[in-house]
Image: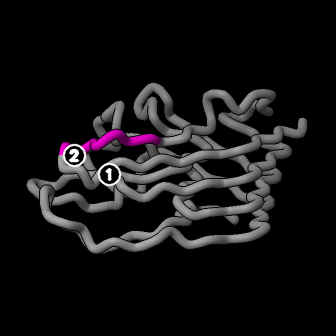
Amino acid sequence: MRGIRTFKLYFQTPRYKIGETPEWGAVGSASSLYFDDVTVDLAAPLDGFDEYTKSDPVRGSFAAFELGANIDLLSLENIGLTLYKDKFPYSYLVCCGPKSVRVGEYEIFDPYLSSRTERLTMRGIIVNGLRINSTDALVREIEFYDVNCDGNSTGRGKIDTIELKV
């Protein structure tokens, strides 16, 4: 696949006014997802919100694969990724967890939803033309602690096991 900027696997409820009760939902689930021979160029975040474009250190993470579902296995093989860390330092191959963007007095996403990926396997990952041998700067687990100071915005993403096969 070519020309894809982001694969999003998460639940999104309607926006809500900060301080009011959001329309609650639950994350979905997926089993044994496999992506092979994919090229992603993260020249800019798909969602053009200021949090991403201005690299907010709390809310500004975005990725080629954004996970907000309960996933037992996600396998990524032969993935070519172009990152622009000088412009977007919070861009990644994989982000796991909730998203949060405020527009005026509204929350657009679901910072209160937690999700978990049990196992993430990767093989043949090329970033900016180089084969990677560590996932440290490429995978982020997102965690919010009442990010909107409203009692409705504490969620986190967790990846139990990451396997990099070189």
Label 1: how many Cα within 10 Å (few below 14, some 14–19, many 20+): many
Q: Which residue is mark 2?
A: 148
Classify mark 2: residues with Cα within 10 Å, few (<14), some (14-19) or many (20+).
some
Residues marked 2 and 1 touching at CB (< 8 Å): yes
Q: Of circles 2 and 1, which is in front?
A: 2
At 77% across and 59% down in the image, what residue appears?
73
Where's residue 3, x and y in %?
Answer: 58, 62
Locate residue 149, reporting x and y percent: 19, 43
Task: Please give the range of residues in magenta.
Answer: 143-149
Question: Which quarter of the rendered picture does the C terminus lie within?
Answer: top right
Whether residue 146 is in magenta: the answer is yes
Q: How many marks can you see?
A: 2
x and y percentages locating residue 119 in the rendered image: 76, 51
Residue picked out by circle 1 = 100
Report x, y in % for residue 91.
Answer: 49, 39
Circle 2: element type = loop
Q: Is residue 147 left or right of residue 91?
A: left
Q: Any magenta on residue 159?
A: no
Q: Nearer the viewer, residue 5 or 29?
A: 29
Where residue 90 sits, quadrant-wise, is: top left
Which residue occupies 28% across, 74% down?
A: 23
Type of amino acid under label 1: Ser
- Assign a secondary structure to mark 1: loop
Task: Locate residue 166 relative to residue 150 in the image: left or right.
Answer: right
Q: Earlier in the sequence, mark 2 or mark 1?
A: 1
Predominant secondary structure, magenta span:
loop
